[in-house]
Amino acid sequence: MPDPERRTRKDAARNRRAVLEAADALFARSESPEDLTMADIAAAAGVGKGTLFRAFGDRAGLLRALYEARLEPVREAAESGPPPLGPATPPQERVPALLDAVLCFKLDNRRLALALEESGSGGPYRAEHYAGWHALLRSVLERIPGLPDADFTAHALLAATRADLVERLADGEGVPRERLRAQLAAYAAKVVAAPPAPFRQD
Amino acid sequence: MPDPERRTRKDAARNRRAVLEAADALFARSESPEDLTMADIAAAAGVGKGTLFRAFGDRAGLLRALYEARLEPVREAAESGPPPLGPATPPQERVPALLDAVLCFKLDNRRLALALEESGSGGPYRAEHYAGWHALLRSVLERIPGLPDADFTAHALLAATRADLVERLADGEGVPRERLRAQLAAYAAKVVAAPPAPFRQD
DNA sequence: TGAAAAACGGACCCTGGGTCCGTATTGTCG
DNA sequence: CGACAATACGGACCCAGGGTCCGTTTTTCA
């Protein structure tokens, strides 16, 4: 009995790659992602719409595939790379580092992230990768003594890196990259900071 | 010379109200906002599509109108009401209170908020009311000594109340309302807390 | 009450995601 | 190598849904 999964034909593989490349390029160039149609992408890849949809299911599928391909190295670095991203880093330091990585990624892949987070309902919260980031961040937060609600905190921190917010700040308000990074880092640091001195006079 | 702005005809006014009411009801009932079509709303209001679009411009316009109508009282309370929402409250306390108000509003108007934040690109960041909340929150944050980046912090805090996140937590994960409120309050409190004790041994 | 202004409403248009199916490629087996 | 099955191709096609148009109706105002 041969594997129930037959090997994918090589033209299929070639086309898949072609689409991925074309879409990647198009998203990088396009002003706003939503006026980039599936037909456009198919055309740019020199492929029929049918092929495109067979390969990726639907728009969201294509976006996800693109996004995850790009994200892979960052994910890798975050899960098992060297400090300050990797697991060897102490939590209080790692949290800002992780968020910084996410932020940089979104800055570098604005249109794509935007397109993905806007696609369909549920925002980014249905996507595979969100769950991954959240779980990781949560587990790191849980190692910080005295910090309650790690689950919620992880969500809240990640919310600060939402693609549309990032775009609004970076493109809309012209906040420079480094400043944004610094602000997010400071914010994250504050959230994970040890609680204030025990005695506060009102 | 009579006013250049002619008075709106009363049938127009009546229809506008009818649409607003019908849409409100429909959104409250509907499972997910995006399968609620403009035609549906028009029909439910006993009105033609043309009327609907003339009155509100486009889908986003209708959503905005609905949202702002509902939001009005909260806004009022936040801008000039009694403590803990109003301006008499000390900043450190007012920030969590404001966020709590936003959160409760989104909990009570989930579908609507969801529909609005998802409509069109730019997420909620183009909407009038977002700018309002942000400005208010920012001004409050600015009164807290030693807290830098009030502008960014306001964005980041508001991001924690994004409709899709709220829905994900409340509906998706079944976090009870009070717990969610408590978590957000704690989170906000931490962000606005005085910096940790000056001496930290590493 | 009559005519101009404004609103009505539903038929209509158009974009864009997604499907279908006759045709072209690929893989395999004798 | 030839032939047949399996698989992929691709663009014509479908359809929902947002938005427009314009002949008809209502309101307003003199």
Image (spheres, coloured by chain):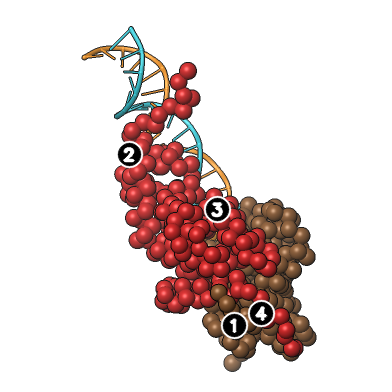
Chain colours: A red, B brown, C cyan, D orange
Q: Which residue is mark 1?
A: B199
Asked whether disc 2 touches disc 1, contact meaning CB atoms under 8 Å apart, the reply is: no
Residue A123 sits above or below residue B195 on the image: above
Residue under the point 41% across and 61% down? A109
In the orientation shown, which residue stands out farthest toward the front?
Answer: B201
- Whether marks 3 and 4 lie on the same chain: yes
Q: Which residue is mark 3?
A: A132
Q: Amino acid at mark 2?
A: Arg
Q: Amino acid at mark 1?
A: Phe
Q: How many marks?
A: 4
**In terms of depth relative to the viewer, which is nearer, A148 or B169?**
A148
**In the displayed structure, does residue A124 sit left or right of residue A32?**
right
Quadrant showing the N terminus of chain B: bottom right
**Residue B165 appears in the figure:** no
Distance (Cα) linking label 1 and label 3: 36 Å
Distance (Cα) linking label 2 and label 4: 58 Å
The chain holding disc 3 is A
The chain holding disc 2 is A
Residue B180 coordinates in the image, percent (x, y): 72, 64
Q: Which residue is mark 4?
A: A196
Q: Which residue is mark 2?
A: A14
Residue under the point 70% across and 54% down? B173
**In the displayed structure, does residue D1 sit left or right of residue D23?**
left
